Amino acid sequence: MYSEIVREPQFYLDNNGEFFPEATTFIITGEYLEFLYHALHTKVVTYFFKRFYAGGGLGKEGYRYKKAFLELLPVPMPIPIKKFDPLNIENEIINLYQLTKEEIEFIDSQ
């Protein structure tokens, strides 16, 4: 699940069916949801979405995870999907995007 209008990533992994979406909350289905959940919370993926896919901000800090744009976001998946360490997901995403040290420093400064 995710909230559409946010100030920071707000994705929730509900493996037990305990949450119910309301008017501006949406459900993502499919495979590899745990990896996607962690990836969408990283600085790198958040930067790419806000910079190239969000379609503009909402006020000084807000932005929208519009479904049409979120579906276009290229999140690289490790092949084969392996057991990953959620605490190390940022580094895994950096490696999958093949970012340079300079690119990482730029994203961190945003």
Image (cartoon, grey):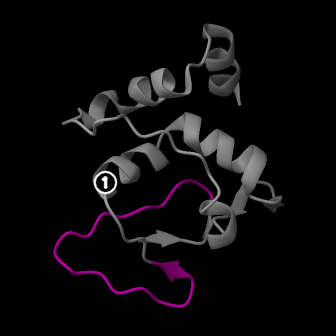
Q: Residue at x 31, y 60 (%)?
A: 31
Question: Which range is magenta?
Answer: 7-26
Q: Position of residue 36 (x, y in %)?
A: 39, 51
Q: Position of residue 109 (x, y in %)?
A: 69, 24
Q: Is residue 8 shown left or right of residue 38?
A: right
Establish if 55 lies above or below 77.
below
The amino acid pointed to by label 1 is Tyr
Q: Position of residue 80 (x, y in %)?
A: 28, 36
Establish if 78 lies above or below 31.
above
Main secondary structure type of the part rendered in magenta: loop
Residue under numbered circle 1: 32
Q: Is residue 110 shown left or right of residue 7?
A: right
Q: For residue 102, which quarter of the picture? A: top right
Q: For residue 70, which quarter of the picture? A: bottom right
Q: Quadrant of the C terminus?
A: top right
Residue 11 lies in the magenta stretch = yes
Q: Quadrant of the N terminus?
A: bottom left
Q: Position of residue 8 (x, y in %)?
A: 57, 53
